[in-house]
Image (spheres, grey):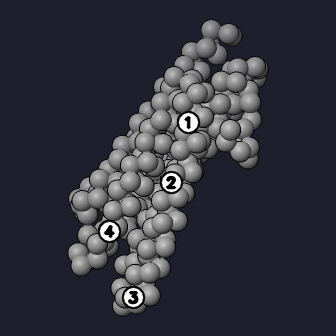
Amino acid sequence: MAENLHRQLQSLKQEVVYVGSLVEEAVAKAVFALNQRDERIAYDVIEADAAIDRMEVSVEEDCLNILALHQPVAHDLRFVVAVLKINNDLERIGDLAKNIAKRVLYLARVRDIEIPSDFTEMSRHAQLMVKHSLDALVTANAHLARQVRADDDRVDEIRDAIEAKVREQLAANPAQAECLMKLSSVARHLERLADMATHIAEEVIYMVEGDIVRHRAVS
């Protein structure tokens, strides 16, 4: 029984790592499409989301089967519970990448509006947070997970700066309201990407140390 549980846990880890790779690729492509206003890449991100959705269901079913059949305890239980939550966060990150890609399809056709340079820094930070949270999961690295939590503040700061610039441009150019609101929407999606990466990092800390840090200030 113990050997069978070990095999299923290893298989579950491989599954969630695979989902993570799909999500990381979706985020990278969405960020690239945004920076380059590349419609083709944006369409790739949108189409790839269905595979992420299917894998999310598969991982959840495997988690529930392990809980029902083996009733794991201690570290094994924390791992399965963490994967259940992380799996949901990964699916949501995939949705956010898809939503950014949809905004890109509009922005690619509106070349007279310049995308503020802050988006480059914000997208880079959000993308790195997703990557580092997944690296922390794969390597069970609580220290890296804590760094992801700390990095979230910088993304929030950039988002606030972007929102201020969008408001200024909106006041100066009300005719460009639709495009500016698309940019504001992209900023919100990037912020949510960082939030989801933070959630994953918090679950990694729980998985490794059994410490629930959610809602706790970053020390």
Residue type highlighted by circle 1: Gln
Q: Above or below — where is 112 with respect to 135?
A: below
Q: Secondary structure at mark 1?
A: helix
Q: Where does the C terminus fall, quadrant-wise?
A: top right
The reply to whether the C-beta atoms of the residues labelled 2 and 4 are less than 8 Å apart is no
The residue pinned by badge 3 equals: 172
Q: Going by the picture, which residue comes out furthest to the bottom?
A: 175
Residue 146, image quadrant = top right
Numbered label tally? 4
At label 4, counting other C-alpha atoms closer than 10 Å, the crowd grade (few under 14, some 14-19, many 20 or more) is: some
The residue pinned by badge 1 equals: 147
At label 3, counting other C-alpha atoms closer than 10 Å, the crowd grade (few under 14, some 14-19, many 20 or more) is: few
Residue 9, image quadrant = top right
Position of residue 18 in the picture relative to residue 204 (left or right): left
- Earlier residue among tags 3 and 1: 1
Whole-number angstrom distance, CA of label 2 to CA of label 4: 17 Å
- Give me the residue at 37% from left, 88% from top: 173
Q: Is residue 204 visible?
A: yes
The reply to whether the C-beta atoms of the residues labelled 3 and 4 are less than 8 Å apart is no
The residue pinned by badge 2 equals: 155
At label 1, counting other C-alpha atoms closer than 10 Å, the crowd grade (few under 14, some 14-19, many 20 or more) is: some
Whole-number angstrom distance, CA of label 2 to CA of label 1: 13 Å
- Give me the residue at 35% from left, 56% from top: 120
Whole-number angstrom distance, CA of label 4 to CA of label 1: 29 Å
Q: Secondary structure at mark 2?
A: helix
Tell me residue 56's x, y (percent): 53, 42
Residue type highlighted by circle 2: Val
- Earlier residue among tags 4 and 1: 4
The residue pinned by badge 4 equals: 115
Q: Secondary structure at mark 4?
A: loop
Q: Above or below — where is 82 with respect to 190?
A: above
- Earlier residue among tags 2 and 3: 2
